Image (cartoon, rainbow, N blue to C red):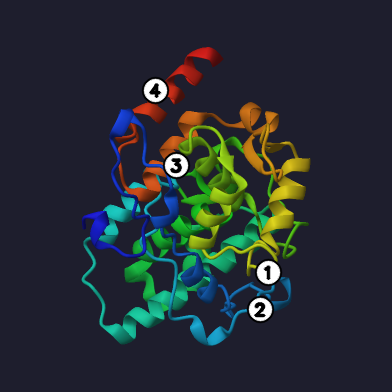
Amino acid sequence: MDPTENSQTFNVPDNTRSQRPARGLEAAQVPVAEVGDAEATVPTSGEVSVGEMPSSPQSAEAASSPPAALGSNAGGASTEASRNQASEVALPEPSLQQELNRKIVDLVFFLLLKYRRGQVTSRAEILHAVIREYEAYYSAIFSKAIDCMRLMFGLDIIERNPLVHSYSLVHALGITYDGLQHGFPGIPKTGLLIIMLCIIFIEDNCVSEEALWRILNGLGLYAGRDHFIYGEPRRLITEHFVQERYLECRQVPGSDPPSHEFLWGPRAHAETTKMKILRFFASIIRRDPRSYPYSYADALRDELQRT
C-alpha cells in the first residue's frame, strides 16, 4: 500500500526547495494516541504477571486500537521474513481483527516485561504464552508488535539463535539510555529521545523551542500534561535528556524576550550517527533516505568524518 493512503503513518509534505528536506513537521502523524489506547490491556496468559507490567492511566476498553502500520524496519532479516509471511495470510474478519489487535497489545507488554527482566524469549514461548490459538497469524502479530517496540519505546528485537528463533531486546540506533526511572517508571523512553534527534536533524540540526512544541503537540505531547508513556514531556526533555547530554538547550543569541533552541548533545554524537537517525526517520515515513538530499549529504559528511 502506498504510505500516503495510510492515515496512521507520517504524512510529510514534499519540499525540494534548495534541495532541503521538508521543514515544519507539523503535518507528520505518528500513531501515538492509538498505541496509547492499546497500552491499557495487560496479557493474562503464560508467565506474564499483571503486577510486573508498566502501569498506564488509559482505559482498558480501548484495546481494539493496536499499533498499526508503523512503517519501521526493526528486526532485520527476521522482520522482513515475517512481513513476507504475513502478506500470505488472508485478511481477517472485523471480529477476528479485534482479537488479533489484542494479541498485538499483549505481545508488546510481554516483550516489555522481557526487556525489564533482561531475558531472552523465543517463537515457541511467544506462541505458548501470548498468541496461542492464533498461530496462523504469528508473523503479522509479531511484525506489528516489533514495529511498536521500535517506534514507541526505541527498542529493537534481535534474533539470537535462528535455529530456535530466540530473540532479545536492545536499544535502537546505538543509544544506551532507556529512561526507565524517568516519567512513568518501568517504561523505556528511548523512543521519544530518538524522535527528538530526528526532529533536530531534519530541522537542519537545530530546532527552536517554539517549533519543537508545535511538532510535539501534533504527536500528542503537551508541556505540563502527563503522557501515558513519557510522563510530563517538558521535564523529560529539558531536564533528563539535557542532563544525560543527549540534547543541548541554549538561548538564541540576541533574542528578546529570551528564547531557546535544541541541538544534539555530545552523548548523542558519540552513540549514534546522523545516517542512522535519517534512515530511522525515512523508515517511518516509508521514503528512501536519499529523497532528502540535503540531510543525506549532511549524514554522508558525518560518516566520512567518523572514518
Is the C-beta separation of discs 4 and 3 under 8 Å? no
8 or 113: which is nearer to us?
Answer: 8
Mark 2–mark 1 Cα distance, whole angstroms, equals 10 Å
Q: Nearer the viewer, mark 1 or mark 3?
A: 1
- In front: label 4 or label 3: 4
Label 4, label 3: how far apart the Cα atoms are: 16 Å
User: Which mark is drawn over residue 90?
Assistant: none
Query: Residue at position x 58%, y 66% from top?
Result: 110
Q: Identify residue for label 2.
A: 57
Separation of disc 2 and disc 4 at Cα? 43 Å
Is residue 109 something one can see in this rendering?
yes
Residue 226: image tag? 1
* Residue at point 48%, 19% (across, down): 303
Residue holding disc 3: 280
Amino acid at dot 2: Pro
Q: Residues within 10 Å of mark 1 (few under 14, many from 20)?
A: some
Residue 200 drawn at (x, y percent): 54, 39
- Compared across the picture, whether 54 is left or right of 75 comes to right
Residue hosting label 4: 297
Please, what secondary structure does the residue beneath circle 1 have?
Answer: loop
